[in-house]
Amino acid sequence: MLPKELRLTLKELFLQKKTLIIVAVAGVIGAACKGYLSLLIRDLMDASSSPEKLKSLAWIGIAVAFGASISRYFHIYLMNIVSEKVTQSLRQQLQSKFLRLNLKFHNNYAAGSGGLISRTMNDLRIIQDGLRLFADLFSAPLLFLFLIGNLFILDARLTIYIFIIVPFLIYFMKKVSVGIRKYSLSGVEQLEKITSVIKESLDGVRTIQSFNLESKMQDRLKVLGDEFVHMRRGIHSRVEIMGPTTELIATFLVLAVIFYFSSAISKGEATAGALIAFITALLQINEPIKKFQEAYVRIQETRVAADRVFTILSEDSEVLESATPQPFPQTWDKIEYKNVSFGYGETNLIKHFNLQVSKGSMVAFVGESGSGKSTLANLLARFYDPNEGSISIGSCDIKEMRLSELRRNIGYVSQDVFLFSDSIENNIKAGIENNLSVIDSAQAAFAHEFIINQADQYNTRVGERGNLLSGGEKQRVGIARALYKDAPILILDEATSALDSVSEIQVQKGLERLMKGRTTFVIAHRLSTIQNADLILVLSKGTVVEMGSHQGLLSKQGEYSRLFQAQMR
């Protein structure tokens, strides 16, 4: 029985069955044409005294040559196309899976986004190379069988003697393949680390340059690269030993065959045509054996890469859609957290959290870093689900809602606004179709003035992650995006903490317009921005230690008052 990873790969491959049928037919024709060549040579040699027979055999030879060439072209060309389609399908499945996996998976994945990129690019390249050779796995055994048949026709006894070495070759290939699989797994894991370091170097180039870390990053890459080369050396040593071994065996066989037939010819038991035909078939057998060996080696590498790809595709860390999803409620009066607990590992970060938020009110979460402020907001948007408890909007548990509708009704503005490498207008729209005006949204976010001063105004491209805009400009585009989305629930996650005073004033004005009439959750370090909140919750290690209004909490002289006084100083 085939290993699971190969069964899944073949399942993807056989989705292209119509093209594979043509590949198979071309392979059969090509193998038959090549297989007939040695018998044709025998007939040509033995018909040297008959010009008419030679002429007819010559025409047959031309037809066989054309048949072999044309069938070979379609056999390989179409298989390459199939491998491209299968690889692209897997690449799309991986991207779709990445986007569905919850934030807990992405935060905990050891190699980070660089590792996931490695699986998408490097592992799929290995699979693609393996699939390209799938055609040889089909045609090489066919040609081998045709040629073995020819050998039996030419001299059955000698062919049986030759077959004695076949078990030794199979054993040799099996032993070599074990080492290839082992080194392949280590190699792709090391390549994943290399990809992660390269991506980290590009993402953090400003920090690397400012701290003079160029040499350190180069050294990290060199160490990983040297280990990768060492692992690849193990693979190459095993792969390349196969070719010389089979060639050495083939050389001895040819010498033995010549000796055998020379004796037979001298006794009148064989002809020179039979000798040349037998040697031709024997030498031709080297081709399918080498192709089968190469394909067999690639299969070992493909197994490793496919296992890593399908491990991700079968990962169950998704935010699951309800079997009977409910629409977002048309009318609702509150958002309620009921006994919610959540943790990234075995220890819960949020512990038995309860909260009721009236529609249209503003709630602020404050506390030291790691206290669970952002986590509570992320749970509402179902970036991940709580380990215990539930969250409901109105009377409907958010797990029962259609996920796309839930998120459509939640606007999100974070400290680090992510902008796509596109125009300002497309970043504000963010794929949302509604009747609102992009310009009105930008004006309300106090972004219109700086946008019209750009060279291409709303068509100005913002660069990768919006790095052609300043921090304040990015934030205002993010606010304009939230205004354009026009969602009834709003999450503001440290939306002004990274800005200078002038930018903060402009962004704060945009936020005040954005929050008007919406149910707002604010995660804030700057307590001056939440003094008008209807309810402030002070969190410490996942639990609420204080709650109330700004003035009420100040009067308690507790944790909130301590934080506020520290910031004022």
Image (spheres, rainbow, N blue to C red):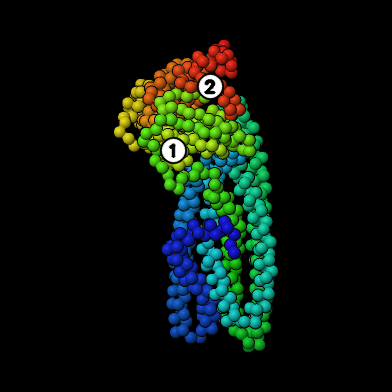
Percent from the top left, x then y, of residue 499? 48, 20
Q: Residues within 10 Å of mark 2 (few under 14, many from 20)?
A: some
The answer to whether residue 82 is seen in the rendering is yes
Whole-number angstrom distance, CA of label 1 to CA of label 2 = 26 Å
Vertical comparison of 212 with 294: above or below: above
Q: Residue at x 54, y 71 (%)?
A: 142
Vertical comparison of 319 with 54: above or below: above
Percent from the top left, x then y, of residue 159? 63, 78
Identity, as a three-letter code, of the amino acid under mark 1: Cys
Determine the residue located farthest toward the top in the rendered image. Answer: 569
Identify the image quadrant of residue 154: bottom right
Of 556 and 434, which appears nearest the observer?
556
Of 129 and 273, which appears nearest the observer?
129
Of 304 and 464, which appears nearest the observer?
304
Q: Earlier in the sequence, mark 1 or mark 2?
A: 1
User: In which quadrant is the N terminus drawn?
Assistant: bottom right
Percent from the top left, x then y, of residue 110? 61, 40
Q: Residue at x 45, y 63 (%)?
A: 17
Identity, as a three-letter code, of the amino acid under mark 2: Met
Q: Secondary structure at mark 1?
A: strand
Callouts 1 and 2 close, C-beta under 8 Å: no
Vertical comparison of 124 with 552: above or below: below
Q: Secondary structure at mark 2?
A: strand
Q: How many numbered discs sit on the rendered protein? A: 2
Determine the residue located farthest toward the bottom in the rendered image. Answer: 268
User: In which quadrant is the C terminus drawn?
Assistant: top right
Return the residue at label 2. Answer: 547
Q: Residue at x 36, y 36 (%)?
A: 330
Q: Residue at x 43, y 20 (%)?
A: 508
Percent from the top left, x then y, of residue 31? 51, 71
Q: Which mark is residue 396?
A: 1
